[in-house]
C-alpha cells in the first residue's frame, strides 16, 4: 500500500464553534494538522473532542467557523464527498458479511455504482472488481488478516475486529483518517499492541490522521502533536515533549503525565514560594503575586540532594515492580512521588525528598496560566 496514495491532505479548523441549543460543545477552535501528521485530540469526557472530529467528518453541522481539507473549504460538503475515512469506537462491522466483504463494502458501493451501470459497462466493472480485490488483499497482508478473510465478525477476537475496521478505512485510500477512540474496547495488553500497530501503519501509509482519545498515555505515545481540550476550548496544541515540559496552564500540567502533577498553593514572599517551610525561587512574573500554584511532577522528586528539601510523611505505598508510587502528606497537602523500588518508604515515617528548582512549574492561582 505504501506509495499508492496520490494525495495526502492537511486539515485546518478556523474559529470552529458548535452549539446544541444553549450548550456550547466546541468554542472558537482553531488548529492546523499538517499533511501526513498524526494529530490527537485529548481531554476528559464532555470536552468536545468527538464533536470536533464529527465536524471534520461532516456528521455535525457547524454553528460558526471554517474547516478545510486539502485547502478546500468543506463546510457545506457532504461526508461522502470529503474523501475521509472514519474508524469508530465500535467496530461497526456487518455481522452477516465475512472479513473480505466488510473491508471491500465501501469500495464496492463507490466503484461499482448501480446494477444498471455494471450491466452497461461490463469490462470496466471487471477491472474495478480486480482493483478492489487487489486493494483488500494488500491491506489484509499489511494487517495480518490474510488467513481471516472468509471469517465472519463473530469468529474474530476484539483485536482482529479492530484490524478489520482499520482495513476497511485503509482500502478507501482517503486523504484523511478520522479515528474516534478506536482502542477503547480492547483490554490493556491488546491496547498497547494495537497502539504500536497503528503507529507502524501510519509510518507506512503517511496518511494525515486525526485521532480522538480520553487516554493521555495513548495521546503522548502516538501523537506528533496533541490538542488538549477542556469544556470545548483548546488549552494547548503542541508536541508531547512541549506539553510535558512546558504546560500552558495548570489544567494541562495536571492532565498530561502519570501520575498527575502535584499542585500546591504557596505564599510568595521576597521572591520565593514558601512550601511547608521550604523556599522555592519564583520566576520574575510571579514576584508581584501574593501566592502561586506550585507544580511538581511525581518523577521529579529525588531521595537525595542537591536541590530544595521537602519533608513529607509517607501515607500509602503502591509497589509497581522496578518503581513505586508513594502517596505523602506535606502539612495539609497531598503529594505523590514516583521513586525506585529500593528507596525505603516506611508508612507513617518522614521521607526527605529533594527537588531541583528548574523542575518546578509555577501557575497563576487565579487564571491557571503558566508563569514563565
Image (tube, rainbow, N blue to C red):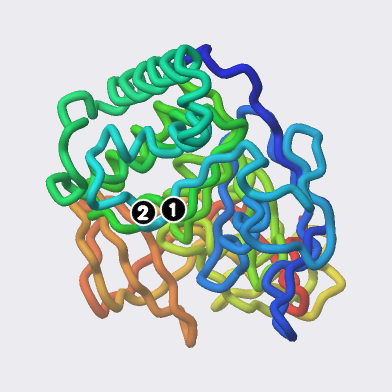
Pick whichever, 172 or 231, lies toward us: 172
Classify mark 2: helix, strand or loop. loop
Quarter of the image containing the N terminus?
top left
Q: Residue 190, how many percent across, how many down?
A: 24, 46
Query: Farthest left residue?
Result: 155
Picture residue at 36% right of the left edge, 40% below the top: 195
Q: Are marks 1 and 2 in contact (CB under 8 Å)?
A: yes
**Res 92 label:** 2
Picture residue at 59% right of the left edge, 65% below the top: 295
Q: Quadrant of residue 288?
A: bottom right
Q: Residue 354, how many percent across, how many down?
A: 47, 57
Q: Residue 121, how many percent across, how many down?
A: 51, 19
**Res 88 label:** 1
Pick whichever, 222 or 316, lies toward us: 222
Q: Residue 113, how many percent across, how many down?
A: 52, 33
Q: Nearer the viewer, mark 1 or mark 2?
A: 2
Amino acid at each position: 500500500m505504501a506509495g499508492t496514495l496520490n494525495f495526502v491532505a492537511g486539515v485546518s479548523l478556523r474559529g470552529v464553534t458548535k452549539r446544541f441549543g444553549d450548550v456550547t460543545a466546541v468554542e472558537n477552535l482553531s488548529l492546523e494538522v499538517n499533511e501526513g501528521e498524526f494529530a490527537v485530540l485529548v481531554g476528559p469526557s464532555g470536552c468536545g473532542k468527538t464533536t470536533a472530529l464529527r465536524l471534520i467528518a461532516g456528521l455535525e453541522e457547524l454553528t460558526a467557523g471554517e474547516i478545510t481539507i486539502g485547502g478546500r473549504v468543506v463546510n457545506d460538503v457532504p461526508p461522502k464527498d470529503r474523501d475521509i475515512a472514519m474508524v469508530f469506537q465500535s467496530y461497526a462491522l456487518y455481522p452477516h458479511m465475512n472479513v473480505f466483504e466488510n473491508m471491500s463494502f465501501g469500495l464496492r458501493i463507490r466503484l461499482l455504482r448501480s446494477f444498471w451501470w455494471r450491466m452497461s459497462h461490463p469490462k470496466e466493472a471487471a477491472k474495478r472488481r480486480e482493483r478492489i480485490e487487489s486493494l483488500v488483499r494488500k491491506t489484509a497482508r499489511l494487517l495480518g488478516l490474510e488467513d481471516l478473510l472468509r471469517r465472519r465478525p463473530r469468529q474474530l477476537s476484539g483485536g482482529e475486529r479492530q484490524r478489520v475496521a482499520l482495513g476497511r478505512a485503509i482500502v478507501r485510500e482517503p486523504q484523511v483518517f478520522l479515528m474516534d477512540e478506536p482502542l477503547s474496547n480492547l483490554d490493556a495488553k491488546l491496547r498497547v499492541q494495537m497502539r504500536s500497530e497503528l503507529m507502524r501503519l501510519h509510518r507506512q501509509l503517511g496518511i494525515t490522521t486525526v485521532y480522538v482519545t480520553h487516554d493521555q498515555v495513548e495521546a503522548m505515545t502516538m501523537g506528533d502533536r496533541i490538542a488538549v481540550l477542556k469544556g470545548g476550548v483548546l488549552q494547548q496544541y503542541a508536541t508531547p515533549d512541549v506539553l510535558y515540559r512546558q504546560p500552558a496552564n495548570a489544567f494541562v500540567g495536571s492532565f498530561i503525565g502519570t501520575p498527575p502533577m502535584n499542585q500546591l498553593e504557596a505564599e510568595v514572599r521576597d521572591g520565593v514560594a514558601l512550601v511547608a517551610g521550604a523556599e522555592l525561587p519564583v520566576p520574575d512574573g510571579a514576584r508581584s503575586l501574593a501566592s502561586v500554584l506550585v507544580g511538581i511532577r511525581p518523577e521529579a522528586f529525588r531521595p537525595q540532594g542537591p536541590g530544595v528539601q521537602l519533608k513529607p510523611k509517607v501515607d500509602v505505598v503502591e509497589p509497581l515492580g522496578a518503581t513505586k508510587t508513594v502517596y505523602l502528606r506535606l502539612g495539609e497537602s497531598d503529594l505523590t512521588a514516583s521513586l525506585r523500588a529500593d528507596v525505603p518508604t516506611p508508612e507513617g515515617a518522614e521521607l526527605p525528598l529533594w527537588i531541583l528548582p528548574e523542575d518546578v512549574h509555577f501557575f497563576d492561582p487565579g487564571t491557571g496560566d503558566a508563569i514563565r
